[in-house]
Amino acid sequence: MLERAEPRVGNKIAAPPREVTLWFTQKLEPAFSNVTVTNATGERIDTGKARVSGNQISVSLRPGGTGTYRVNWRVLSVDTHTTNGNFTFQVGQ
């Protein structure tokens, strides 16, 4: 299960983040875990190269402007449980 995220779920931040990081309650299987991020126009702005370390997964972002960002994830924990979901956060004043 998703434990926390940075930027936080539903949060409003002033400037576009350089990356998104998600923490889960169990360690992740890198080969079967991914995260994507889209900006307010629906354009995918993640670099596509998610990094997994233990129970966290991060992805770098290209500049995406202001508005609502959507984060989608699908991860496989080392105990073979799959989880997926999404959340949004706001960028701008």
Image (cartoon, rainbow, N blue to C red):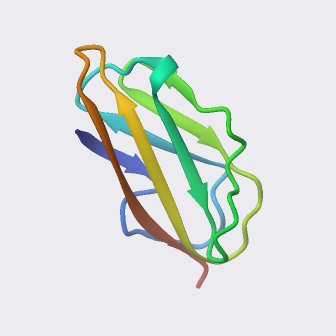
Q: Nearer the viewer, residue 13 or 25?
A: 25
Residue displayed at 77% across by 61% down: 63
Direction from residue 8 to residue 50 in the image, left or right? right
Quadrant for the C terminus in the image: bottom right
Residue displayed at 46% across by 24% down: 32
Quarter occupied by residue 83: top left
Direction from residue 90 to residue 17 in the image, left or right? right
Residue displayed at 41% across by 17% down: 29
Vertical arrangement, residue 41 with respect to residue 6, above or below:
below
Residue displayed at 48% across by 19% down: 30
The spot of residue 61 in percent (x, y) is 69, 50
Q: Nearer the viewer, residue 86 or 6?
A: 86
The spot of residue 7 in percent (x, y) is 47, 56
Vertical arrangement, residue 44 with respect to residue 29, above or below:
below
Quarter occupied by residue 58: top right
Vertical arrangement, residue 5 with respect to residue 89, above or below:
above
Direction from residue 14 to residue 48 in the image, left or right? right
The spot of residue 34 in percent (x, y) is 51, 35
